[in-house]
Amino acid sequence: MSKHQIAITFLVLFILPLMFACGPGPGKDKVPPATQASRGLNAESVTETVTRIANTSAESVNGRKVYSVSCLLCHGKNGDQKANNAMDLTTSTLSLEERIKVIAFGRKQMTSFQDKLRDPEIKAVAEYVATLRKDVQ
């Protein structure tokens, strides 16, 4: 392989996915973020989904591992990386239900994980994120 081919391969396999994983940088949104209404969701269906996930057992899921695969890129190992305007999880005061809602449906530039993670995985990540708070450690 030539140096040019290696560079292109590196770009395609590593850099481009990194750029698009958490959304565009600040002020670079060309399309407004999707709202719950534009996703065909109403307050009742959102509440029902959050309640269903909150009542799901997550005992068999390692929230830290799921976080490492799905969240680490933007939020970082300790939750304070803030890549692509990601929230600083170390200062979050969200309740479990609020964290589940954000993970499941997304917020601002954060993508929805409802179709990417199973209910127990969403709950496990929501529980794990609480351990990243500075006041908990």
Image (cartoon, grey):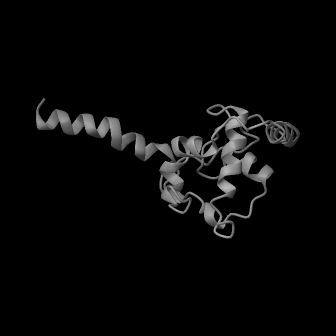
Looking at the picture, tell me which residue is in the foreground, 37 or 130: 130
Indicate the quadrant where residue 123 lies. top right
Residue 45 vs 130, above or below: the answer is: above
In this image, 133 relative to 8: left or right?
right
Coordinates of residue 65 in the picture (x, y in percent): 56, 42
Q: Is residue 135 left or right of residue 4?
A: right
Residue at the (65%, 67%) spot, across then down: 91
Residue 53 lies in quadrant: top right
State which quarter of the image contains the C terminus.
bottom right
Query: Where is residue 43 shown, x and y percent of the image?
Result: 85, 43
Could you say which quadrant of the image residue 47 lies in? Answer: top right
The quadrant of the image that shows the N terminus is top left
The single residue placed furthest to the bottom in the displayed view is: 135
**Residue 129 higher or lower than 13, as above or below:** below
Nearest the viewer among 86 and 125 is: 125
Position of 26 compared to 56: left or right? left
**Residue depicted at 54% across the width and 59% down the height:** 78
One can see residue 27 in this view = no
Residue at (74, 46) in percent of width and height = 100
Residue drawn 66% across and 45% down? Answer: 125
Residue 19 rendering spot, x and y as whole percentages = 41, 46
- Residue at the limit of the structure toward the left, as seen here: 2
Q: Nearer the viewer, residue 29 or 97?
A: 97
Residue 97 vertical position relative to residue 80 in the rendered view, above or below: above
